[in-house]
Image (spheres, rainbow, N blue to C red):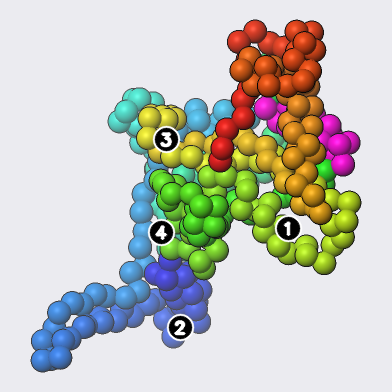
Amino acid sequence: KANIVLDTVVAMFSEYCAEPFSVEPVEVSYVDAEGKETNKYVTPQMYTRREKAGVDFVNSLIGIDVSAERMVELCDKLQLGPASLATDEATGKECIEVTVPPTRSDILHPVDIAEDVGIAYGYNNIVKRVPATSTVGGEQPLNKLGDLLRDEIGRAGYTEVLTHGLCSKHDNFTALRRAETDAVSLSNPANVEYQVVRTTLLPGLLKTLQHNKSASFANGFKIFEISDVVLPDSAHVITETIVGAKNVRRLAAVYAGPTSGFEVVHGLVDRIMTLTEVAPEKAYAANSAKGEEEKFRVSREGWEYGIRAL
């Protein structure tokens, strides 16, 4: 990144040199304690590279019909020259090959080349047309379920919170009296509070209670969060790349007050499971005084829930 900034700044100020747009290179040498040269390099590098973009790809992305020769002219206007015609070795299709100067570090992908072609062509010159396919946008089922649950839990008197997705290893494991397991960790965290991606929502909720000690707990303090946690998953493959992790949507609620509040949280669990049509396990329902009522619960076949220790 430092070389990118240096190349850009040098290229800008080279306009004011005695010989405009000329740069004098400098050789930097490193020596050890004995005075022997260990390494050397020339700076600034003023690095240029060649990038390709398919003609059909550019036309389809922008929504225009321009010849390859015209695209070459447009690229020259946007400081991507000299540009030339080429052939994609993988597909055999016609493409344009541009020269990315040191001042255009923003060109990272063929999409960036297509964007510059669109700018040079003129967005106002692109003819508006009705899409060939008719589609209707919709909410993802998982997000829709989360929104519906948020409304119902809010009606039960709980306040929703949104906590940070990163936390320390101490908060995620040690403070919860859990053994430290695999988690997605940051190689260079900004501070100790951002070491790993959370594997549970509890640290954020407990910290919310910690920072709200001044609030009244006389009638109980009820908070909840519906958000994602990230769990290791070496077998999860997306777009032919092993990601090694996956997002899992979780719901967590916490009650703090002058009493244990077990019945408060238990009531919330029962309400959520009733709404989602999930029945309790038979062994768990047998311990309830209302076991007979469970016969009339509307539930999905094969869907059951139980209670387990954290």
Marks 2 and 3, the one that precedes in the sequence: 2
Q: Quadrant where the N terminus lies?
A: bottom left
As drawn, is 30 to the left or to the right of 14?
Answer: left
Distance between the alpha carbons at the discs numbered 2 and 3: 56 Å
Three-letter code for the amino acid on which mark 2 is drawn: Cys
At label 4, counting other C-alpha atoms closer than 10 Å, the crowd grade (few under 14, some 14-19, many 20 or more) is: few
- Label 4: which residue? 187
Three-letter code for the amino acid on which mark 3 is drawn: Asp
- Label 3: which residue? 233
**Image point 37% across, 35% down: which residue?**
234
Marks 4 and 2, the one that precedes in the sequence: 2
- Label 1: which residue? 209
Residue 300 lies, with reference to residue 164, above or below; the image says above
Distance between the alpha carbons at the discs numbered 2 and 1: 62 Å
As drawn, is 82 to the left or to the right of 75?
Answer: left
Q: Disc 1 vs disc 3: Cβ atoms closer than 8 Å?
A: no
- Label 2: which residue? 17
Q: Disc 2 vs disc 3: Cβ atoms closer than 8 Å?
A: no
Distance between the alpha carbons at the discs numbered 4 and 1: 29 Å
Q: Would you say residue 238 is visible in this rendering? A: yes
> Element under label 3?
strand
Marks 2 and 1, the one that precedes in the sequence: 2
Residue 82 shown in magenta: no
Distance between the alpha carbons at the discs numbered 4 and 2: 43 Å
Residue 274: mark: none
Q: Which residues are magenta?
A: 142-157
